[in-house]
Image (tube, rainbow, N blue to C red):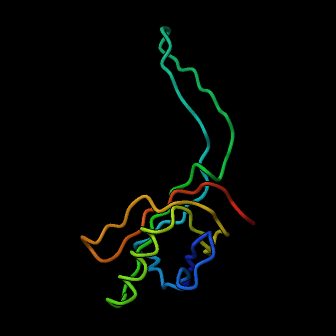
Amino acid sequence: MMISLCSYLFDYFGNYLLKADLDKSDFTLLSRRVSRSATLDGGALIIDNGYSASDATFSISVSNLSLADRSAILATLQQHSLVVLSCKTGCFLGVVERVDESQGFKISFLVKSQLN
């Protein structure tokens, strides 16, 4: 699946089309702001504060990335705090929390807001 990763602020070199490996990536969007506390009677108190796209964290695994593309992506992520991610679940503004290169190239993307 193709995804787009672009710097939020204008940058000639800050846009990339990447092929995400669907078997190793996670684009799960749905999670609710829920907390649970145990009560003295053995039950639980559940507080549901609803849904927000900003609770999502995407794990993006990219395979077959050239050394030049890897260096360019890392340079963009070091220079720009906010990036725009377009994928099958929508278009999102967020920040890359970290890049893990221990088993390929894996990006952890924290969603700030949904743009679409």
Examine the image and state in which quarter residue 101 appears: bottom left
Q: Position of residue 11 (x, y in %)?
A: 58, 79
Left or right: 108, with 82 as reference point: left
Of all residues shown, which one is farthest toward the right?
Answer: 116
Q: Residue at x 47, y 62 (%)?
A: 96
Is residue 41 shown above or below 114? above
Examine the image and state in which quarter residue 69 appears: bottom left
- Work out which quarter of the rendered image holds the C terminus and state it: bottom right
Q: Position of residue 76 (x, y in %)?
A: 46, 75
Is residue 55 shown above or below 20? above
Q: Position of residue 102 (x, y in %)?
A: 24, 70
Count the marks. 0
- Work out which quarter of the rendered image holds the N terminus and state it: bottom right
Q: Residue at x 60, y 74 (%)?
A: 87
Q: Residue at x 67, y 34 (%)?
A: 49
Out of 74 and 104, give the one closest to the viewer.
74
Examine the image and state in which quarter residue 104 appears: bottom left
Left or right: 45, with 69 as reference point: right
Q: Residue at x 47, y 80 (%)?
A: 20
Of all residues shown, which one is farthest toward the left?
Answer: 102
Q: Position of residue 81 (x, y in %)?
A: 51, 61
